[in-house]
Image: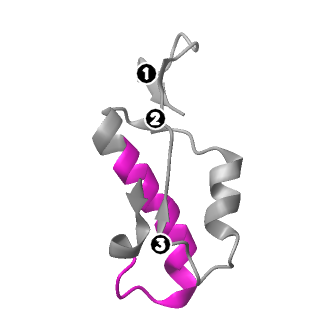
């Protein structure tokens, strides 16, 4: 569960949803220890569901670390 409310405290309205996506990325990076994070379209839709300013207070996220298929990728793993 990512508590978006605390990451978006005192953020101006028009930057809330984009900053929430960045906060989810940062959270996943910290927890899963991978640099390459791919956010699912459903998660993106959910964050943006109430518009740019009214973000859901918390989001439950299921993350999985997967091996990168691309041979010349910088990172061995990515998070989905």
Quadrant housing the C terminus: top right
User: Alpha carbon of mark 1 to alpha carbon of mark 2: how far?
Assistant: 7 Å
**Cβ atoms at labels 1 and 2 below 8 Å apart:** yes
Q: Percent from the top left, x then y, of residue 11?
A: 41, 85
Q: Secondary structure at mark 2?
A: strand
Residue 18 belongs to magenta span: yes
Q: Percent from the top left, x then y, of residue 69?
A: 58, 12
Can you say whether 61 is above or below 77 in the image?
below
Residue located 41% across and 53% down the image: 1
Mark seen at residue 36: 2
User: Alpha carbon of mark 3 to alpha carbon of mark 1: how far?
Assistant: 29 Å
Q: Going from the N terminus, do you reach mark 1 or mark 2 first?
A: 2
Part of the protein shown in magenta: 8-28
Residue located 46% across and 65% down the image: 58
Q: Is residue 67 left or right of residue 35?
A: right
Residue neighbourhood size for the residue with mark 2, other residues' Cα within 10 Å, grouped as few (<14), some (14–19), many (≥20):
some
Residue located 58% across and 45% down the image: 39
Circle 1 sits on which residue? Answer: 77
Mark seen at residue 57: 3
Task: Give the label, 3 or 1, closer to the camera.
Answer: 3
Q: Secondary structure at mark 1?
A: strand
């Amino acid at each position: 569960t990512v508590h978006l409310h605390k990451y978006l405290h005192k953020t101006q309205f028009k930057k809330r949803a984009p900053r929430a996506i960045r906060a989810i990325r940062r959270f996943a990076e910290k927890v899963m220890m991978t640099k390459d994070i791919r956010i699912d379209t459903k998660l993106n839709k959910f964050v943006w569901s109430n518009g740019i300013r009214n973000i859901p207070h918390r989001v439950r996220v299921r993350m999985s670390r997967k091996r990168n298929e691309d041979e010349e990728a910088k990172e061995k793993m990515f998070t989905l």
